[in-house]
Image (cartoon, rainbow, N blue to C red):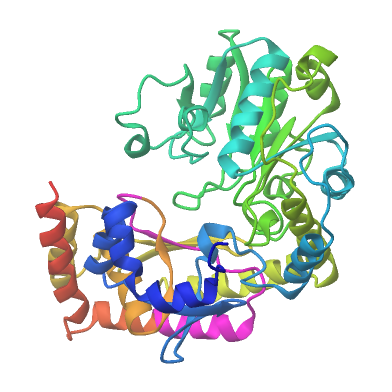
Amino acid sequence: MSKEFDLGRLLAERGGERYELHARHLNHQLPRMLRTIGFDKVYERAEGAYFWDADGNDYLDMLAGFGVMGLGRHHPVVRKALHDVIDASLADLTRFDCAPLPGLLAEKLLAHSPHLDRVFFGNSGTEAVETALKFARYATGKPRIVYCTHAFHGLTTGSLSVNGESGFRDGFAPLLPDTAIELGDLAALERELKRGDVAGFVVEPVQGKGVHEPSPGFLLAAQELLHRHKALLIADEVQTGLGRTGAFYAYQHAEGVEPDLVCVAKTLSGGYVPVGATLGKDWVFKKVYSSMDRVLVHSASFGSNAQAMAAGLAVLAALEDEDVIANARATGELLRTRLAALVDRYELLRDVRGRGLMIGIEFGRPSSLKLRSRWTMLQAARKGLFAQMVVVPLLQRHRILTQVSGDHLEVIKLIPPLIIGDAEVDRFVEAFTAVMDDAHGGSGLMWDFGRTLVKQAVGNR
Protein backbone atom coordinates (compact mmCIF):
# COMPACT_ATOMS: atom_id res chain seq x y z
CA MET A 1 0.00 0.00 0.00
CA SER A 2 1.17 3.51 -0.75
CA LYS A 3 1.89 5.90 2.08
CA GLU A 4 -1.19 7.94 2.99
CA PHE A 5 -1.27 11.31 1.26
CA ASP A 6 -1.30 14.19 3.75
CA LEU A 7 -1.73 17.60 2.12
CA GLY A 8 -1.23 19.52 5.36
CA ARG A 9 2.05 17.74 6.04
CA LEU A 10 3.25 18.33 2.47
CA LEU A 11 2.57 22.06 2.72
CA ALA A 12 4.19 22.25 6.16
CA GLU A 13 7.30 20.49 4.92
CA ARG A 14 7.71 22.18 1.55
CA GLY A 15 5.52 25.28 1.44
CA GLY A 16 8.57 27.42 2.16
CA GLU A 17 10.04 26.39 -1.20
CA ARG A 18 7.22 28.02 -3.17
CA TYR A 19 9.30 30.60 -5.05
CA GLU A 20 12.14 28.16 -5.76
CA LEU A 21 9.68 25.56 -7.06
CA HIS A 22 8.16 28.07 -9.45
CA ALA A 23 11.57 29.21 -10.65
CA ARG A 24 12.65 25.62 -11.28
CA HIS A 25 9.51 24.02 -12.72
CA LEU A 26 7.01 26.69 -13.87
CA ASN A 27 7.26 30.17 -15.40
CA HIS A 28 10.72 31.20 -14.22
CA GLN A 29 10.03 34.89 -14.92
CA LEU A 30 7.19 35.09 -12.38
CA PRO A 31 9.30 34.83 -9.19
CA ARG A 32 11.92 37.07 -10.79
CA MET A 33 9.31 39.75 -11.49
CA LEU A 34 7.75 39.48 -8.02
CA ARG A 35 11.13 39.86 -6.30
CA THR A 36 12.04 42.85 -8.48
CA ILE A 37 9.00 44.87 -7.41
CA GLY A 38 8.88 43.55 -3.84
CA PHE A 39 5.74 41.50 -4.32
CA ASP A 40 7.34 38.22 -3.19
CA LYS A 41 5.09 37.92 -0.16
CA VAL A 42 4.12 34.72 1.62
CA TYR A 43 0.39 34.64 2.34
CA GLU A 44 -0.77 32.01 4.81
CA ARG A 45 -4.55 32.28 4.62
CA ALA A 46 -7.39 34.32 3.17
CA GLU A 47 -11.02 35.15 3.82
CA GLY A 48 -13.41 37.59 2.21
CA ALA A 49 -11.46 40.59 0.94
CA TYR A 50 -8.31 39.93 2.99
CA PHE A 51 -5.09 37.89 3.08
CA TRP A 52 -2.91 37.30 6.15
CA ASP A 53 0.82 36.60 6.33
CA ALA A 54 2.64 34.41 8.84
CA ASP A 55 2.96 37.35 11.26
CA GLY A 56 -0.79 37.95 11.28
CA ASN A 57 -0.67 41.13 9.17
CA ASP A 58 -3.76 41.64 7.03
CA TYR A 59 -3.69 42.71 3.36
CA LEU A 60 -6.67 44.25 1.58
CA ASP A 61 -7.36 42.58 -1.77
CA MET A 62 -8.38 45.11 -4.44
CA LEU A 63 -7.58 42.68 -7.25
CA ALA A 64 -9.84 39.67 -6.51
CA GLY A 65 -7.63 37.27 -8.47
CA PHE A 66 -8.18 39.32 -11.67
CA GLY A 67 -11.91 39.26 -10.86
CA VAL A 68 -12.29 35.57 -10.06
CA MET A 69 -13.00 36.20 -6.38
CA GLY A 70 -16.17 38.20 -6.89
CA LEU A 71 -17.64 36.92 -3.61
CA GLY A 72 -14.30 37.14 -1.85
CA ARG A 73 -12.29 34.14 -0.74
CA HIS A 74 -13.90 31.11 0.88
CA HIS A 75 -17.47 32.33 0.86
CA PRO A 76 -19.38 30.05 3.28
CA VAL A 77 -22.28 29.37 0.88
CA VAL A 78 -19.91 28.21 -1.86
CA ARG A 79 -17.79 26.19 0.55
CA LYS A 80 -20.85 24.34 1.85
CA ALA A 81 -22.11 23.65 -1.67
CA LEU A 82 -18.78 22.10 -2.63
CA HIS A 83 -18.62 19.96 0.50
CA ASP A 84 -22.18 18.85 -0.18
CA VAL A 85 -21.58 17.94 -3.82
CA ILE A 86 -18.43 15.96 -3.02
CA ASP A 87 -20.15 14.15 -0.16
CA ALA A 88 -23.06 13.28 -2.48
CA SER A 89 -20.80 10.96 -4.53
CA LEU A 90 -22.70 11.79 -7.71
CA ALA A 91 -22.24 9.80 -10.91
CA ASP A 92 -20.55 12.75 -12.60
CA LEU A 93 -19.29 13.13 -16.18
CA THR A 94 -20.60 9.77 -17.37
CA ARG A 95 -21.01 11.48 -20.75
CA PHE A 96 -24.08 9.42 -21.52
CA ASP A 97 -26.71 10.87 -19.22
CA CYS A 98 -28.28 14.25 -18.45
CA ALA A 99 -27.19 15.32 -14.97
CA PRO A 100 -29.48 17.75 -13.10
CA LEU A 101 -26.98 20.39 -11.96
CA PRO A 102 -26.04 21.77 -15.42
CA GLY A 103 -29.70 22.21 -16.29
CA LEU A 104 -30.41 23.94 -12.98
CA LEU A 105 -27.48 26.33 -13.36
CA ALA A 106 -28.41 27.09 -16.97
CA GLU A 107 -31.97 27.84 -15.84
CA LYS A 108 -30.73 30.27 -13.19
CA LEU A 109 -28.35 32.05 -15.57
CA LEU A 110 -31.01 32.38 -18.24
CA ALA A 111 -33.42 33.87 -15.69
CA HIS A 112 -31.02 36.84 -15.62
CA SER A 113 -30.84 36.82 -19.43
CA PRO A 114 -34.48 36.61 -20.59
CA HIS A 115 -33.69 37.21 -24.27
CA LEU A 116 -31.33 34.19 -24.37
CA ASP A 117 -32.32 30.55 -24.45
CA ARG A 118 -29.44 28.08 -24.08
CA VAL A 119 -26.06 27.65 -22.37
CA PHE A 120 -22.82 25.84 -23.11
CA PHE A 121 -20.56 25.20 -20.10
CA GLY A 122 -16.79 25.10 -20.48
CA ASN A 123 -13.93 25.67 -18.10
CA SER A 124 -12.69 29.26 -18.45
CA GLY A 125 -13.31 32.69 -19.87
CA THR A 126 -11.18 32.11 -22.95
CA GLU A 127 -13.09 28.87 -23.59
CA ALA A 128 -16.38 30.76 -23.35
CA VAL A 129 -15.09 33.21 -25.97
CA GLU A 130 -13.81 30.39 -28.19
CA THR A 131 -17.30 28.88 -28.07
CA ALA A 132 -18.92 32.17 -29.05
CA LEU A 133 -16.52 32.63 -31.98
CA LYS A 134 -17.18 29.13 -33.28
CA PHE A 135 -20.95 29.41 -32.85
CA ALA A 136 -21.07 32.82 -34.57
CA ARG A 137 -19.07 31.57 -37.55
CA TYR A 138 -21.13 28.42 -37.94
CA ALA A 139 -24.53 30.05 -37.41
CA THR A 140 -23.90 32.85 -39.91
CA GLY A 141 -21.72 30.94 -42.38
CA LYS A 142 -19.25 33.84 -42.37
CA PRO A 143 -15.55 33.68 -41.40
CA ARG A 144 -14.56 37.02 -39.87
CA ILE A 145 -14.95 38.54 -36.39
CA VAL A 146 -14.57 42.25 -35.65
CA TYR A 147 -13.09 43.20 -32.27
CA CYS A 148 -11.73 46.30 -30.53
CA THR A 149 -8.20 47.57 -30.13
CA HIS A 150 -6.96 47.06 -26.53
CA ALA A 151 -9.54 44.32 -25.97
CA PHE A 152 -8.69 41.24 -23.92
CA HIS A 153 -10.73 38.14 -24.68
CA GLY A 154 -8.29 35.39 -23.69
CA LEU A 155 -5.04 33.78 -24.77
CA THR A 156 -5.99 30.57 -26.59
CA THR A 157 -5.56 30.84 -30.34
CA GLY A 158 -9.11 31.82 -31.30
CA SER A 159 -9.45 34.29 -28.45
CA LEU A 160 -5.96 35.61 -29.15
CA SER A 161 -7.12 36.42 -32.69
CA VAL A 162 -9.53 38.95 -31.18
CA ASN A 163 -7.10 40.20 -28.53
CA GLY A 164 -6.43 43.85 -29.22
CA GLU A 165 -3.01 43.99 -27.60
CA SER A 166 0.05 43.26 -29.73
CA GLY A 167 2.16 42.25 -26.74
CA PHE A 168 0.05 39.11 -26.32
CA ARG A 169 -0.14 38.35 -30.06
CA ASP A 170 3.51 38.79 -31.04
CA GLY A 171 5.19 35.56 -32.07
CA PHE A 172 2.01 33.47 -32.22
CA ALA A 173 0.97 34.16 -35.82
CA PRO A 174 -0.72 33.16 -38.02
CA LEU A 175 -3.98 33.78 -36.23
CA LEU A 176 -7.55 33.85 -37.50
CA PRO A 177 -8.52 36.50 -40.11
CA ASP A 178 -10.15 38.98 -37.77
CA THR A 179 -10.22 42.79 -37.80
CA ALA A 180 -9.81 45.43 -35.07
CA ILE A 181 -11.63 48.73 -34.77
CA GLU A 182 -11.50 51.41 -32.10
CA LEU A 183 -14.00 51.00 -29.25
CA GLY A 184 -16.99 53.18 -30.14
CA ASP A 185 -16.12 53.64 -33.84
CA LEU A 186 -19.48 52.91 -35.46
CA ALA A 187 -18.35 54.03 -38.92
CA ALA A 188 -15.48 51.53 -38.87
CA LEU A 189 -17.83 48.74 -37.82
CA GLU A 190 -20.24 49.60 -40.64
CA ARG A 191 -17.35 49.67 -43.14
CA GLU A 192 -16.31 46.13 -42.13
CA LEU A 193 -19.87 44.84 -42.20
CA LYS A 194 -20.38 46.10 -45.76
CA ARG A 195 -17.72 43.64 -46.92
CA GLY A 196 -20.29 40.91 -46.25
CA ASP A 197 -18.04 38.38 -44.50
CA VAL A 198 -18.42 39.39 -40.83
CA ALA A 199 -19.92 36.76 -38.52
CA GLY A 200 -19.98 38.92 -35.43
CA PHE A 201 -18.59 41.71 -33.30
CA VAL A 202 -17.13 40.75 -29.92
CA VAL A 203 -16.91 43.52 -27.32
CA GLU A 204 -16.35 44.05 -23.61
CA PRO A 205 -19.09 46.45 -22.46
CA VAL A 206 -16.39 47.94 -20.21
CA GLN A 207 -12.88 47.27 -21.44
CA GLY A 208 -10.62 45.77 -18.81
CA LYS A 209 -7.48 47.38 -20.18
CA GLY A 210 -7.64 50.99 -19.04
CA VAL A 211 -11.28 50.68 -17.89
CA HIS A 212 -12.94 52.31 -20.88
CA GLU A 213 -16.61 52.35 -21.90
CA PRO A 214 -17.93 52.99 -25.39
CA SER A 215 -19.78 56.22 -26.01
CA PRO A 216 -23.50 56.25 -25.03
CA GLY A 217 -25.65 54.60 -27.67
CA PHE A 218 -22.78 52.75 -29.36
CA LEU A 219 -23.75 49.23 -28.31
CA LEU A 220 -27.38 49.67 -29.37
CA ALA A 221 -26.39 51.19 -32.71
CA ALA A 222 -23.82 48.43 -33.24
CA GLN A 223 -26.48 45.80 -32.52
CA GLU A 224 -28.81 47.31 -35.11
CA LEU A 225 -26.03 47.46 -37.71
CA LEU A 226 -24.97 43.87 -37.05
CA HIS A 227 -28.48 42.51 -37.37
CA ARG A 228 -29.05 44.48 -40.56
CA HIS A 229 -25.99 42.72 -42.02
CA LYS A 230 -26.96 39.30 -40.52
CA ALA A 231 -24.09 39.30 -38.05
CA LEU A 232 -24.10 38.71 -34.29
CA LEU A 233 -23.34 40.84 -31.25
CA ILE A 234 -21.12 38.96 -28.77
CA ALA A 235 -20.80 40.45 -25.29
CA ASP A 236 -17.70 39.36 -23.38
CA GLU A 237 -18.86 39.61 -19.76
CA VAL A 238 -16.11 37.35 -18.39
CA GLN A 239 -14.85 40.09 -16.09
CA THR A 240 -17.78 42.51 -16.09
CA GLY A 241 -20.61 40.01 -15.61
CA LEU A 242 -22.37 38.81 -12.45
CA GLY A 243 -22.51 42.16 -10.71
CA ARG A 244 -19.07 43.68 -11.23
CA THR A 245 -20.43 46.94 -12.70
CA GLY A 246 -23.50 47.21 -10.48
CA ALA A 247 -25.80 45.29 -12.85
CA PHE A 248 -25.93 41.56 -13.49
CA TYR A 249 -24.37 42.23 -16.91
CA ALA A 250 -22.54 45.40 -17.92
CA TYR A 251 -24.43 45.59 -21.22
CA GLN A 252 -27.64 46.09 -19.19
CA HIS A 253 -26.52 49.67 -18.52
CA ALA A 254 -27.31 50.33 -22.21
CA GLU A 255 -31.07 50.22 -22.72
CA GLY A 256 -32.28 47.94 -25.50
CA VAL A 257 -29.05 45.99 -25.94
CA GLU A 258 -29.66 42.23 -26.18
CA PRO A 259 -26.54 40.40 -27.38
CA ASP A 260 -26.89 37.21 -29.40
CA LEU A 261 -24.13 35.51 -27.42
CA VAL A 262 -22.84 36.32 -23.92
CA CYS A 263 -19.67 34.95 -22.31
CA VAL A 264 -19.29 34.67 -18.51
CA ALA A 265 -16.75 33.06 -16.16
CA LYS A 266 -14.60 34.37 -13.26
CA THR A 267 -17.13 35.21 -10.49
CA LEU A 268 -19.31 32.24 -11.51
CA SER A 269 -16.57 29.95 -10.14
CA GLY A 270 -16.94 31.15 -6.58
CA GLY A 271 -13.15 31.27 -6.62
CA TYR A 272 -12.89 27.49 -6.42
CA VAL A 273 -13.69 25.56 -9.59
CA PRO A 274 -12.81 26.80 -13.10
CA VAL A 275 -15.95 27.37 -15.14
CA GLY A 276 -17.05 29.32 -18.17
CA ALA A 277 -20.44 29.70 -19.83
CA THR A 278 -21.59 30.85 -23.25
CA LEU A 279 -25.23 31.88 -23.38
CA GLY A 280 -26.98 32.25 -26.71
CA LYS A 281 -30.15 32.40 -28.69
CA ASP A 282 -32.02 29.22 -29.52
CA TRP A 283 -31.55 29.46 -33.28
CA VAL A 284 -27.77 29.76 -32.90
CA PHE A 285 -27.51 26.61 -30.80
CA LYS A 286 -29.88 24.73 -33.11
CA LYS A 287 -27.73 25.62 -36.10
CA VAL A 288 -24.59 24.30 -34.39
CA TYR A 289 -26.24 21.17 -32.99
CA SER A 290 -28.37 20.59 -36.08
CA SER A 291 -28.61 16.78 -35.91
CA MET A 292 -27.77 13.81 -33.70
CA ASP A 293 -24.63 13.35 -35.81
CA ARG A 294 -23.44 16.73 -34.49
CA VAL A 295 -24.32 16.17 -30.83
CA LEU A 296 -20.64 16.37 -29.78
CA VAL A 297 -19.45 18.80 -32.45
CA HIS A 298 -18.52 21.23 -29.67
CA SER A 299 -17.90 19.90 -26.17
CA ALA A 300 -15.50 20.09 -23.22
CA SER A 301 -14.13 17.13 -21.26
CA PHE A 302 -14.67 18.77 -17.88
CA GLY A 303 -17.56 21.00 -18.93
CA SER A 304 -20.66 20.83 -16.72
CA ASN A 305 -18.83 18.93 -13.98
CA ALA A 306 -20.78 18.72 -10.74
CA GLN A 307 -18.34 20.75 -8.62
CA ALA A 308 -18.36 23.68 -11.05
CA MET A 309 -22.14 23.59 -11.40
CA ALA A 310 -22.61 23.48 -7.61
CA ALA A 311 -20.24 26.42 -7.18
CA GLY A 312 -22.11 28.40 -9.84
CA LEU A 313 -25.49 27.71 -8.25
CA ALA A 314 -24.15 28.76 -4.86
CA VAL A 315 -22.70 31.97 -6.31
CA LEU A 316 -26.02 32.96 -7.91
CA ALA A 317 -27.85 32.21 -4.66
CA ALA A 318 -25.42 34.40 -2.69
CA LEU A 319 -25.67 37.23 -5.21
CA GLU A 320 -29.45 37.26 -4.79
CA ASP A 321 -29.75 36.53 -1.07
CA GLU A 322 -27.07 38.98 0.07
CA ASP A 323 -27.83 41.87 -2.32
CA VAL A 324 -24.25 41.69 -3.58
CA ILE A 325 -24.96 43.51 -6.85
CA ALA A 326 -26.62 46.43 -5.07
CA ASN A 327 -23.62 46.58 -2.74
CA ALA A 328 -21.23 46.66 -5.70
CA ARG A 329 -23.20 49.51 -7.23
CA ALA A 330 -23.35 51.62 -4.04
CA THR A 331 -19.84 50.88 -2.78
CA GLY A 332 -18.38 51.40 -6.23
CA GLU A 333 -20.06 54.79 -6.53
CA LEU A 334 -18.71 55.79 -3.11
CA LEU A 335 -15.16 54.71 -3.97
CA ARG A 336 -15.16 56.32 -7.40
CA THR A 337 -16.61 59.58 -6.08
CA ARG A 338 -14.07 59.87 -3.27
CA LEU A 339 -11.17 59.14 -5.61
CA ALA A 340 -12.48 61.53 -8.26
CA ALA A 341 -12.49 64.29 -5.65
CA LEU A 342 -8.68 63.97 -5.51
CA VAL A 343 -8.12 64.79 -9.19
CA ASP A 344 -7.92 68.55 -8.59
CA ARG A 345 -5.65 68.00 -5.59
CA TYR A 346 -2.87 66.06 -7.33
CA GLU A 347 -1.33 67.16 -10.63
CA LEU A 348 -0.12 63.61 -11.35
CA LEU A 349 -3.70 62.29 -11.15
CA ARG A 350 -5.54 62.70 -14.47
CA ASP A 351 -8.84 60.80 -14.24
CA VAL A 352 -10.97 58.37 -12.22
CA ARG A 353 -13.61 56.41 -14.13
CA GLY A 354 -15.59 53.18 -14.17
CA ARG A 355 -18.81 51.50 -13.14
CA GLY A 356 -19.61 49.68 -9.93
CA LEU A 357 -16.52 48.00 -8.54
CA MET A 358 -14.53 48.26 -11.76
CA ILE A 359 -12.59 51.50 -11.45
CA GLY A 360 -9.65 52.94 -13.39
CA ILE A 361 -7.28 55.50 -11.86
CA GLU A 362 -5.26 57.23 -14.58
CA PHE A 363 -2.08 59.24 -14.08
CA GLY A 364 -0.72 61.89 -16.42
CA ARG A 365 2.06 64.38 -17.12
CA PRO A 366 2.32 66.95 -14.30
CA SER A 367 2.63 70.69 -14.81
CA SER A 368 5.35 71.64 -12.31
CA LEU A 369 8.94 71.52 -13.60
CA LYS A 370 10.37 69.22 -10.90
CA LEU A 371 7.64 66.60 -11.21
CA ARG A 372 7.62 66.91 -14.99
CA SER A 373 11.32 66.08 -15.25
CA ARG A 374 10.86 62.99 -13.08
CA TRP A 375 7.82 61.92 -15.08
CA THR A 376 9.78 62.33 -18.33
CA MET A 377 12.56 60.14 -16.94
CA LEU A 378 10.10 57.32 -16.32
CA GLN A 379 8.33 57.70 -19.66
CA ALA A 380 11.63 57.61 -21.54
CA ALA A 381 12.45 54.25 -19.94
CA ARG A 382 9.02 52.65 -20.21
CA LYS A 383 5.49 53.94 -20.18
CA GLY A 384 3.57 52.59 -17.19
CA LEU A 385 6.35 52.88 -14.62
CA PHE A 386 4.64 55.61 -12.61
CA ALA A 387 1.54 53.49 -12.11
CA GLN A 388 3.83 50.66 -10.95
CA MET A 389 5.46 53.13 -8.55
CA VAL A 390 2.03 53.65 -6.97
CA VAL A 391 1.10 49.96 -6.86
CA VAL A 392 4.28 48.97 -5.00
CA PRO A 393 3.97 51.24 -1.93
CA LEU A 394 0.26 50.46 -1.72
CA LEU A 395 1.34 46.87 -1.03
CA GLN A 396 4.60 47.36 0.82
CA ARG A 397 3.57 50.22 3.11
CA HIS A 398 -0.21 49.92 3.28
CA ARG A 399 -0.73 46.20 2.63
CA ILE A 400 -3.17 46.72 -0.26
CA LEU A 401 -2.91 44.58 -3.39
CA THR A 402 -3.70 46.30 -6.72
CA GLN A 403 -2.55 46.01 -10.33
CA VAL A 404 -1.48 48.18 -13.25
CA SER A 405 -4.31 47.94 -15.77
CA GLY A 406 -2.18 46.86 -18.72
CA ASP A 407 1.26 46.96 -20.26
CA HIS A 408 2.48 50.49 -21.04
CA LEU A 409 -0.52 52.06 -19.30
CA GLU A 410 -0.44 54.67 -16.55
CA VAL A 411 -3.67 53.27 -15.11
CA ILE A 412 -4.38 51.28 -11.95
CA LYS A 413 -7.46 49.08 -12.13
CA LEU A 414 -9.49 48.31 -9.01
CA ILE A 415 -11.60 45.15 -9.21
CA PRO A 416 -12.03 44.14 -5.55
CA PRO A 417 -14.43 41.50 -4.24
CA LEU A 418 -18.00 42.70 -4.63
CA ILE A 419 -18.57 42.32 -0.88
CA ILE A 420 -16.33 45.20 0.27
CA GLY A 421 -17.91 48.10 2.15
CA ASP A 422 -17.23 51.49 3.69
CA ALA A 423 -14.31 50.25 5.84
CA GLU A 424 -12.42 49.02 2.78
CA VAL A 425 -13.20 52.24 0.88
CA ASP A 426 -11.80 54.27 3.79
CA ARG A 427 -8.67 52.15 3.98
CA PHE A 428 -7.96 52.38 0.26
CA VAL A 429 -8.61 56.12 -0.08
CA GLU A 430 -6.46 56.92 2.95
CA ALA A 431 -3.60 54.77 1.65
CA PHE A 432 -3.86 56.14 -1.88
CA THR A 433 -3.86 59.70 -0.54
CA ALA A 434 -0.69 58.97 1.47
CA VAL A 435 1.04 57.52 -1.59
CA MET A 436 0.07 60.49 -3.74
CA ASP A 437 1.26 62.89 -1.03
CA ASP A 438 4.60 61.10 -1.13
CA ALA A 439 4.75 61.24 -4.93
CA HIS A 440 4.14 65.01 -4.88
CA GLY A 441 6.28 65.72 -1.81
CA GLY A 442 9.97 66.05 -1.16
CA SER A 443 10.79 62.71 0.51
CA GLY A 444 11.85 61.09 -2.75
CA LEU A 445 11.09 57.55 -1.53
CA MET A 446 8.84 56.74 -4.47
CA TRP A 447 11.18 58.38 -6.96
CA ASP A 448 14.13 56.40 -5.58
CA PHE A 449 12.15 53.28 -6.34
CA GLY A 450 11.31 54.78 -9.74
CA ARG A 451 15.01 54.91 -10.59
CA THR A 452 15.24 51.22 -9.73
CA LEU A 453 12.38 50.51 -12.12
CA VAL A 454 14.08 52.57 -14.83
CA LYS A 455 17.27 50.53 -14.51
CA GLN A 456 15.23 47.33 -14.70
CA ALA A 457 13.30 48.53 -17.77
CA VAL A 458 16.48 49.60 -19.59
CA GLY A 459 18.20 46.33 -18.67
CA ASN A 460 15.36 44.31 -20.19
CA ARG A 461 15.65 45.96 -23.63
161 left or right of 109 in image: left
Is 416 within the magenta?
Answer: yes
Res. 230 in view: no
Residue situated in front as seen by the camera: 118 or 403: 118
Is 63 within the magenta?
Answer: no
Instruction: Indicate the quadrant where residue 19 lies.
Output: bottom left
Instruction: Indicate the quadrant where residue 229 lies.
Output: top right
90 left or right of 4 in image: right
In the figure, 175 relative to 451: above or below? above
Residue situated in front as seen by the camera: 38 or 239: 38
In the figure, 401 relative to 137: above or below? below
At horizontal 19% and vertical 55% (from top left) the residue drawn is: 379
In the figure, 17 relative to 146: above or below? below
102 left or right of 199 in image: right
At horizontal 60% and vertical 44% (from top left) the residue drawn is: 124
At horizontal 46% and vertical 74% (from top left) the residue drawn is: 11
Instruction: Indicate the quadrant where residue 73 lies.
Output: bottom right
Residue 20's spot in the image, x, y percent?
Answer: 28, 65
Residue 149's spot in the image, x, y percent?
Answer: 44, 34
Residue 451's spot in the image, x, y percent?
Answer: 12, 68
Q: Magenta region: which residues? A: 407-432
